[in-house]
C-alpha cells in the first residue's frame, strides 16, 4: 500500500508545504532540494515541535489535537475548505464552528437570485439577517431595500412588524417554526454570542417570542409550504426550499416557488406592474 494511502494527512501536509514560497514568509531562498517550505519552517510558523511535525508527515505519534491542526492551518495559510479537509483527515470530523460573516454577497450570487423573476428568493445569514434578495421577494415578501440594514432581520420583522404578522395564514405556527429553525441555524454556525442581543431585545418586546424561545423547540429548515395574504392579490401559496451556499457556511438561500397556477399568475401580474407602473387607459 502506498504512503499516500497509508497516511493521507501526511500527504496533504507535504503537498501544501511544497506550494509555499519561502521568500514570501521571510525564509531565505537559496538552494533547496525540494520546492516550498522545510518541515522545521512549517513547525516554526505553527509554533509546534519540528519533531512532532515530522512525525505527523510520517504518520507517527497518533492523532493530532484540534489545537495543533488549527495552528497548522494558520501556518500553512489554508483556505476554509482546506482547513475543514485537514480536520477530517486528522480527527475524522469538521472543526468546531466559529461564526463569521461579512454580511455581503458576491455579484454572482445576486445574479442567481435575479435569474428567478417570478420566484421570490433571499439570502440570509445564520442569524437570519437578510443580506440579498430579488425583485420578486421585494414585491411579495418585504421590500428589504426600504428598511435600515439593522431592521432586515426575519425574526425582528416576524415579531415586531404588525403587517408581516397579519400576512401569515397561521402566524403562531409559522412563528414557532421560524424560532426553532433560527435556534438550530445559530447553534450549527456557532453564533450563540451573536444572537444574544437580538434574543434579549425580542424577549423584551414580544411576549410571544419570549415564550417560544423558552420552549427550546428546534426545527429543520429544508422545505415546506408558506401561505401569505397579499394586500392586493389575496392568498399566495408558495413552496419554499432552503439551500446552502457552497464555501459560505454562514449563508443560506431560501427560494419560494408558486405552489398553484393561481399564485403563479398573481406574482406575474405583480412583477409586470412593477415593470410598467403606468395606469391602463
Image: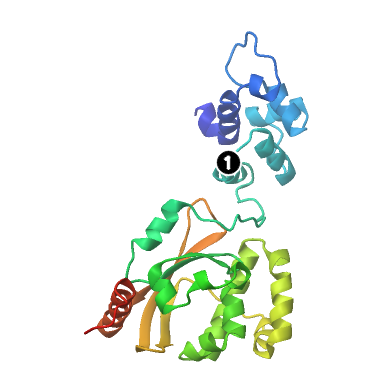
Q: Is residue 223 left or right of residue 263?
A: right
Spot occupied by residue 116 in the image (x, y as percentages of width and height): 33, 65
The residue positioned farthest toward the top in the image shown:
31
**Please, is residue 134 above or below residue 111 in the view?**
below
Q: Nearer the viewer, residue 191 or 4?
A: 191
Spot occupied by residue 29 in the image (x, y as percentages of width and height): 65, 13
Q: Residues within 10 Å of mark 1 (few under 14, many from 20)?
A: few
Residue located at (71% from left, 23% from top): 41
Q: Nearer the viewer, residue 118 or 252?
A: 118
How many numbered callouts? 1
The residue positioned farthest toward the left in the image shown:
281
Spot occupied by residue 273 in the image (x, y as percentages of width and height): 31, 77
Residue located at (60% from left, 41% from top): 86
Q: Quadrant of the C terminus?
A: bottom left
Residue located at (50% from left, 69% from top): 145
Q: Nearer the viewer, residue 267 or 51?
A: 267
At mark 1, the secondary structure is loop
**Please, is residue 161 above or below residue 126 in the view?**
below
Display colour scheme:
rainbow
Residue named by callout 1: 79
Spot occupied by residue 99 in the image (x, y as percentages of width and height): 65, 57
Question: Would you say residue 158 is visible in this rendering?
Answer: yes
Question: Would you say residue 173 is visible in this rendering?
Answer: no
Amino acid at each position: 500500500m502506498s504512503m499516500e494511502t497509508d497516511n493521507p494527512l501526511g500527504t496533504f501536509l507535504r503537498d501544501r508545504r511544497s506550494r509555499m514560497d519561502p521568500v514570501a514568509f521571510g525564509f531565505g531562498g537559496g538552494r533547496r532540494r525540494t520546492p516550498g517550505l522545510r518541515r522545521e519552517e512549517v513547525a516554526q510558523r505553527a509554533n509546534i515541535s519540528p519533531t512532532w511535525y515530522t512525525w505527523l508527515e510520517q504518520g507517527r505519534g497518533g492523532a493530532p489535537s484540534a489545537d495543533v491542526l488549527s495552528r497548522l492551518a494558520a501556518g500553512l495559510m489554508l483556505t476554509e475548505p482546506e482547513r475543514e479537509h485537514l480536520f477530517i483527515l486528522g480527527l475524522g470530523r469538521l472543526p468546531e464552528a466559529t461564526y463569521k460573516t461579512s454580511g455581503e454577497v458576491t455579484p454572482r450570487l445576486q445574479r442567481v437570485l435575479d435569474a428567478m423573476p417570478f420566484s421570490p428568493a433571499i439570502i440570509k445569514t445564520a442569524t437570519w439577517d437578510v443580506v440579498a434578495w430579488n425583485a420578486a421577494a421585494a414585491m411579495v415578501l418585504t421590500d428589504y431595500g426600504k428598511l435600515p440594514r439593522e431592521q432586515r432581520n426575519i425574526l425582528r420583522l416576524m415579531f415586531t412588524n404588525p403587517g408581516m404578522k397579519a400576512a401569515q395564514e397561521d402566524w403562531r405556527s409559522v412563528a414557532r417554526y421560524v424560532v426553532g429553525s433560527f435556534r438550530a441555524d445559530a447553534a450549527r454556525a456557532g453564533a450563540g454570542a451573536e444572537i444574544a442581543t437580538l434574543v434579549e431585545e425580542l424577549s423584551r418586546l414580544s411576549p410571544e417570542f419570549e415564550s417560544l424561545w423558552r420552549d427550546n423547540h428546534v426545527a429543520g429548515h429544508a422545505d415546506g409550504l408558506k401561505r401569505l395574504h397579499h394586500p392586493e392579490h389575496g392568498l399566495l401559496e408558495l413552496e419554499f426550499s432552503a439551500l446552502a451556499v457552497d464555501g459560505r457556511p454562514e449563508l443560506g438561500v431560501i427560494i419560494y416557488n408558486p405552489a398553484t397556477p393561481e399564485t403563479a399568475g398573481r406574482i406575474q401580474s405583480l412583477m409586470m406592474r412593477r415593470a410598467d407602473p403606468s395606469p391602463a387607459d
